[in-house]
């Protein structure tokens, strides 16, 4: 029997903000209701932020950044490693009406994926950071321990007398770029709070809850599903700088965690217990987002831990969450659940964006969404063909809905493999391969072929075995060969010939973004060196 999230008797869930309520009003309301209760907590160094202290800090940020906005500097970049300091500055800047661009502190300075390009792409006027500016960065840079520089006019734009961008503020983000050049997205406070309230309501969060978030705070998931949903619910959130497998379950018990915000790579790492580990009984669910979760991984995790997996689907353009599996019913393998706080439909692949007809149930087509959290377009007006005049946005995903409306995703449109006219959807092939217990992760991509156009090739990471001292060792060629032989038999049994990969390539790790989403376009390139390769024909 599959695990179902259950809820113990709890305090009343804090009411969600009304659609026209600003972030500063939410912060003040939580301060009044919850005062010195802990809101943000560092998982390792003991740093905390109470609701009352958050309001005090917010007032200071509003005073500091009000002057900055008056000098025409309305987009604030955040390059902050410390998670508590990040949450404080993020909420302070957004509540002050600024646009905030959270950036990865570990990114290189130059190059298409570097800090210099990200600052230009998101239009950052001044950076707030917990470290010095790297060489080569010309943007105004203020370290948090010298924040008084924001008050004395030394950070300014000559000749500017008023904000250049009107609006209530929010976040400016680049999409993940896993399928091409990043797109710049602007999400106002109203969109962020709408989704945060939807997440809090769906997870039934209340003041007694303590969430755990090891995901990067420069990503929309952690900002909305973690920081803002906890604020809306009046619950506590424990932040870590990254995911640490060693001592994970002990940390969950010591911090009395009730739910975990995760991605498939983390769920996979936690699906086997290390010697002596026990799972805290206080955890009622783990939420998986940012990439498809293989059914076999979810099954293994639930069987090992007894904790229900809540699979979800989201994107930056919708302020993160689009669908989520209900807590109250057994998990439907392969489904990412039902729409939460928005409309969703499936459109035939031959129909235009916003077409008049919705595809019937079980028909694989384009996923389109519409709602209060969905952007109306990208910054700069790019890719307008993805938006319809009546508010529908084409997500770029292919999927179907069952008779109860549950959504199942099959592929990104860019990932579909055309093998001599036969369309191969990677998800089906990946599920067949991923069912093998030795597969830690799998991605199927198209390889150019002179006659067929493309053929599918499977890339896998194999599970590492630990020796008596707990040290992992990589699988040998013989072990990889045995896995390849098993997978070949499975594919011959379960898939028609056109869908079977011609080769199985074993790599040490998948090229992936900070949330674990695989960068498929880097597979079958020198960016993903192959350890072993086996012919599956």
Image (cartoon, rainbow, N blue to C red):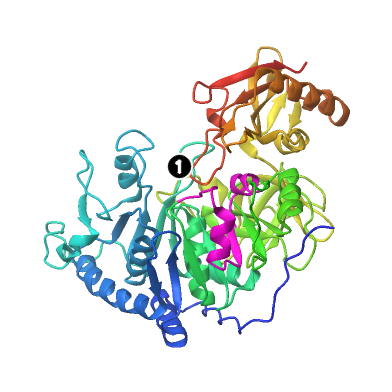
Q: Position of residue 115 (x, y in %)?
A: 32, 42
Q: Point out residue 118 in the picture as x, y percentages from the top left corner.
A: 35, 44
Q: In this rendering, would 193 be left or right of 69?
A: right
Camera sees residue 358: no
Q: Is residue 422 visible?
A: yes
In the image as oriented, which residue stretches furthest toward the front?
A: 468
- Above or below 28: residue 84: above
Q: Residue 356: image x %, image y %?
A: 71, 55
| Magenta span | 242-270
How far across and how far down the image is residue 369, in percent?
63, 57
Side of 369 where 196 appears, left or right: left
Q: Is residue 412 left or right of residue 45?
A: right
Can you name the residue that lies furthest to the bottom here?
A: 32
Q: On screen, 520 above or below 52?
A: above
249 part of magenta stretch: yes
Residue tagged by mark 1?
182
> Residue 482 falls in which quadrant of the image?
top right
Residue 445's quadrant in the figure?
top right
């Amino acid at each position: 029997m599959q695990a179902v999230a259950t809820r113990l008797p709890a305090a009343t869930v804090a009411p969600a903000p009304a659609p026209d309520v600003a972030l500063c009003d939410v912060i003040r309301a939580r301060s009044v209701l919850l005062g010195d209760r802990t809101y943000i907590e560092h998982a390792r160094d003991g740093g905390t932020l109470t609701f009352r202290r958050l309001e005090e800090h917010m007032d200071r940020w509003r005073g500091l950044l009000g002057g900055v906005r008056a000098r025409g500097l309305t987009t604030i970049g955040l390059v902050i490693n410390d998670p508590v300091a990040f949450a404080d500055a993020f909420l302070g800047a957004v509540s002050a009406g600024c646009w905030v661009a959270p950036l990865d502190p570990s990114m290189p300075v130059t190059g298409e994926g570097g800090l210099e390009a990200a600052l230009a792409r998101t239009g950052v006027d001044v950076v707030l950071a917990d470290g010095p500016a790297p060489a080569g960065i010309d943007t105004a840079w203020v370290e948090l321990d010298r924040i008084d520089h924001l008050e004395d006019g030394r950070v300014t734009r000559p000749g500017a007398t008023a904000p250049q961008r009107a609006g209530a503020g929010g976040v400016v983000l680049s999409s993940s770029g896993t399928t091409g050049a990043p797109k710049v997205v602007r999400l106002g406070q109203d969109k962020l709070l709408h989704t945060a309230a939807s997440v809090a309501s769906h997870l039934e969060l209340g003041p007694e809850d303590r969430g755990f978030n090891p995901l990067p705070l420069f990503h929309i998931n952690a900002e909305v599903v973690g920081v803002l949903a906890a604020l809306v619910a009046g619950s506590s959130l424990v932040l870590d700088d990254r995911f640490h497998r060693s001592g994970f379950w002990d940390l969950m018990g010591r911090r009395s965690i009730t739910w975990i915000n995760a991605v498939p790579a983390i769920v996979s790492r936690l699906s086997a217990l290390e010697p002596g580990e026990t799972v805290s009984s206080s955890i009622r669910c783990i939420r998986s987002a940012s990439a498809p979760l293989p059914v076999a991984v979810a099954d293994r995790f639930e069987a090992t831990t007894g904790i229900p997996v809540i699979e979800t689907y989201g994107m930056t353009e919708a302020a993160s969450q689009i669908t989520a599996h209900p807590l109250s019913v057994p998990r439907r393998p392969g489904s990412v659940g039902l729409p939460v706080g928005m409309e969703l439909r499936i459109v035939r692949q031959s129909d235009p964006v916003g077409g008049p007809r919705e595809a019937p149930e079980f028909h694989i087509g384009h996923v389109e969404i519409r709602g209060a959290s969905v952007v109306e377009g990208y910054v700069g007006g790019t890719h307008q063909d993805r938006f319809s005049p009546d508010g529908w946005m084409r997500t770029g995903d292919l999927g179907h809905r069952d008779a109860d409306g549950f959504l199942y995703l099959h592929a990104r449109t860019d990932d579909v493999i055309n093998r001599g006219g036969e369309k191969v959807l990677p998800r089906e092939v990946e599920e067949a391969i991923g069912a093998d217990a030795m597969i830690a992760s799998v991605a199927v991509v198209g390889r150019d072929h002179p006659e067929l156009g493309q053929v599918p090739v499977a890339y896998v990471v194999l599970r590492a075995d630990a020796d008596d001292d707990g040290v992992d060792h990589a699988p040998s060629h013989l072990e990889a060969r045995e896995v390849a032989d098993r997978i070949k038999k499975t594919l011959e049994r379960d898939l028609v010939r056109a869908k079977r990969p011609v080769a199985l390539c074993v790599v040490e790790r998948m090229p992936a973004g900070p949330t674990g989403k695989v960068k498929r376009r880097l597979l079958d390139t020198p960016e993903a060196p192959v350890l072993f390769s086996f012919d599956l024909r």
